[in-house]
Image: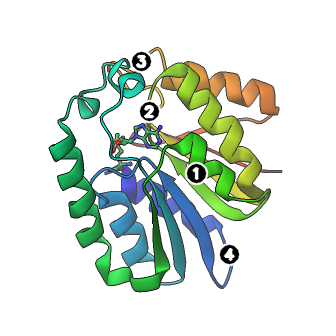
């Protein structure tokens, strides 16, 4: 699954401790996998778990949930990563707010898998790119994957690559990534 591919990419980060962020967490399956695989990983988990018009407007089936269902997913994620103790930190706020809580060049990687609409993905890529350190990774999901997000994710990442002047690399399971020069 895509979390294994993301996990493989983290092997490129040769640091005694890894500091990263997953943006769009849902049930926490990717976060839990990464925290289990890397015992030296400290992970920020960003997801508002809120029913919201901008998210629903994308047509993404994951957006069509009741607030009770979002609350249950949050609890599921909390339980999924409980084992990681102080190595995980939840930010139950939208990506656009969470990104302001970080400083430039702070993190080794950011994995973006939140609102799949074009404007949101582009804003996420440009915003979180600032937070990734030199040599760090910006990773995304659903690049080239067909769905309600077809006109969002890939065009947005391509536009980000153009604006940032970087080359994107595609991996299996619709994972896309680039390394900060
Ligand atoms: C496709 S799911 C994430 C799947 C997860 N990354 C995984 O690998 O299992 C998308 C998630 O993005 C969250 N989301 C939607 N809008 C968001 C925003 N503005 N900021 C952060 N997360 C957002 C949703 O609540 C949902 O849980």
Asked if ligand 1 lies within 8 A of label 1, the reply is yes
Quadrant of residue 31 within the rendered picture: bottom left
Circle nearer the viewer, 1 or 4: 1
Circle nearer the viewer, 4 or 3: 3
Lower sequence index among marks 4 and 3: 4
Lower sequence index among marks 1 and 2: 1
Pinpoint residue 24: horizontal percent, then vertical percent.
Answer: 42, 47
Q: CA distance from mark 1 to mark 2?
A: 14 Å
**Residue bearing the label numbered 1:** 98
**Residue bearing the label numbered 4:** 14
Quadrant of residue 17 within the rendered picture: bottom right
Q: Residues within 10 Å of mark 4 (few under 14, many from 20)?
A: few
Q: Which mark is residue 106?
A: none
Asked if ligand 1 lies within 8 A of label 2, the reply is yes
Circle nearer the viewer, 1 or 2: 1
**Residue bearing the label numbered 3:** 150
Residue 170 vertical position relative to residue 118 in the rendered view, above or below: below
Is residue 47 visible to us here? yes
Marks 4 and 3 close (CB-CB < 8 Å)? no
Could you say whether the residue bearing mark 3 is in a helix, strand or loop? loop
Q: Residues within 10 Å of mark 3 (few under 14, many from 20)?
A: some
């Amino acid at each position: 699954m895509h979390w294994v591919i993301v996990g493989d990419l983290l092997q490129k980060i040769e640091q005694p401790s890894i500091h990263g962020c997953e943006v769009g967490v849902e049930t926490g399956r990717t976060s839990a996998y990464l925290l289990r695989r890397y015992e030296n990983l400290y992970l920020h988990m960003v997801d508002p778990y809120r029913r919201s018009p901008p998210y629903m407007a994308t047509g993404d089936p994951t957006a069509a949930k009741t607030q009770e269902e979002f609350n249950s997913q949050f609890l599921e994620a909390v339980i999924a990563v409980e084992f990681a103790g102080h190595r995980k930190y939840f930010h139950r706020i939208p990506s656009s707010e969470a990104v302001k809580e970080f400083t430039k060049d702070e993190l080794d990687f950011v994995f973006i898998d939140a609102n799949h609409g074009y404007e949101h993905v582009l804003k996420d890529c440009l915003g979180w790119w600032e937070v990734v350190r030199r040599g760090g990774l910006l990773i995304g999901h659903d690049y080239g994957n067909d769905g309600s997000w077809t006109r969002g994710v890939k065009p947005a990442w391509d536009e980000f690559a153009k604006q940032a002047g970087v080359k994107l690399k595609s991996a299996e399971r619709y994972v896309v990534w680039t390394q900060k020069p």
